[in-house]
Image: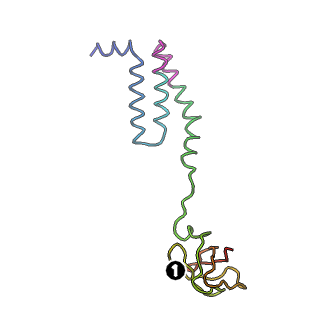
Amino acid sequence: MNGFWEWLGDNAWAGWLGVGLVLATAELLSLDLVLLMLAVGAFAGAGSAALGASLTVSAVVAIAVSLGMLALARPSLIKRLHSGPDLKTGTKALVGASGVALSAVDATQGQVKLGGETWSARAFDPDVTIEEGTVVAVFEIDGATAVVYPAE
């Protein structure tokens, strides 16, 4: 066992590389990007040790790079990963969608076809009657009624 420690003392880069690989592998389980930033620091320590730096210098490099990655790179990566488009589901997904009037739609009644489904509908403007076959757009969904207006 002493032979291993002597070899590791002479090849500190291998120890840093091993630590970096373990941290990068553990990141696959956490998906928080903290362990990945620490792994990058360990790889930097491996690089400095491979260039002949002492264990103390390699440790300082690893710590400095890890802290730099945690402070500078991780926040922007997290922001980029969490800034995807909003997913609209349910009736919110229908707002702005277009459809076709199946019957005359006025301020109180009518039917439209939206996304392959028949909806009860009423006109957004109470003074407008939308004729059958007119392309409409959804202004809002009020309960089970689509509030629509002529899209053309």
- Which residue is farthest left? 1
In the image, 47: left or right of 100? left
Q: Quadrant of the N terminus?
A: top left
Q: Is residue 46 above or below residue 100?
A: above
The verdict on residue 3 being magenta is: no
Q: Nearer the viewer, residue 77 or 121?
A: 121
Q: Which kind of residue does numbered mark 1 sit on?
A: Thr
Front-most of residues 48 and 141? 141
Q: With 150 as the anchor, is 22 left or right in this view?
A: left
Question: Horizontal and vertical percent for residue 138?
Answer: 62, 73
Report the residue marked by disc 1. Answer: 118
Q: Is residue 55 magenta?
A: yes
Relative to the observer, which residue lies in front, 40 or 128?
128
Residue at x-position 57% and y-position 68%: 92
Magenta residues span 46-62
Give residue 21's position: percent from left, percent from top.
40, 30
Dot 1: few (<14), some (14–19), or many (≥20) neighbours within 10 Å? some
Q: Residue at x 48, y 16 (%)?
A: 56
